[in-house]
């Protein structure tokens, strides 16, 4: 597996297991597994004494489950994440531009103000898609 990303490795592991019949037949239980893993992450981070190693383990399980969901939906996880990164960067650039237009910086804005700008950037993006 060498220089492949962990996402690519997870995809290949799951595809290999699938060829041996170790796989769900439909997407519904795969989605349920993602939700289960998400709940387990939540359970860990809600502990009074959070164990960072346990949180990392649960996040890894969640990522593994999401990769499996991607595989079942014929989505390449690397491409999906690359696209999400590009989308985030585009929106974030708009948020920064909106702040500058208001004569502000993100550092001086409340999270609520930043969220308003984020939603404005999302709306502008959706309007450009039409």
Image (spheres, grey):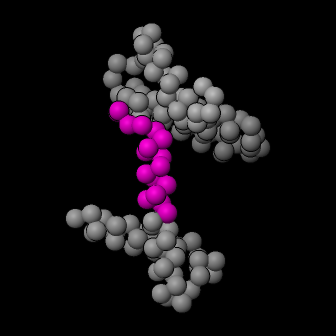
Rendered position, 22 above or below 115: above
Question: From the viewer's perspective, is 26 left or right of 76?
Answer: left
x 53%, y 22%: residue: 13
Residue 39 at x, y percent in the picture: 54, 38
Question: Magenta part mainly helix, strand or loop?
Answer: helix
x 51%, y 81%: residue: 99
Image quadrant where one finds the C terminus: bottom left
Question: From the viewer's perspective, is 55 left or right of 97?
Answer: right
Rendered position, 93 above or below 58: below
Q: In which quarter of the image is residue 53?
A: top right
Residue 40 at x, y percent in the picture: 59, 35
Image quadrant where one finds the N terminus: top right
Residue 118 at x, y percent in the picture: 46, 69
Between residue 99 and residue 15, name the one nearer to us: 15
Rendered position, 84 above or below 127: above
Q: Give the range drawn in magenta.
A: 73-89
Question: Looking at the image, how many numbered discs can be counted on the residues?
Answer: 0
Question: From the viewer's perspective, is 13 left or right of 126?
Answer: right
x 40%, y 71%: residue: 121
Rendered position, 54 above or below 21: below
């Amino acid at each position: 597996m060498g220089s492949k990303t962990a996402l690519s490795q997870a995809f290949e592991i799951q595809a290999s297991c699938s060829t041996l019949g170790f796989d769900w037949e439909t997407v519904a239980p795969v989605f349920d597994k993602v939700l289960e893993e998400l709940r387990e992450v939540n359970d860990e981070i809600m502990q009074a004494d959070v164990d960072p190693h346990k949180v990392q383990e649960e996040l890894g399980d969640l990522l593994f489950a999401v990769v499996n969901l991607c595989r079942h939906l014929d989505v390449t996880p690397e491409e999906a994440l690359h696209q999400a990164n590009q989308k985030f960067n585009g929106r974030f650039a708009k948020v920064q531009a909106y702040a500058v237009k208001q004569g502000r910086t993100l550092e001086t804005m409340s999270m609520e103000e930043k969220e308003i700008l984020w939603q404005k950037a999302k709306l502008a993006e959706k309007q450009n898609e039409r």
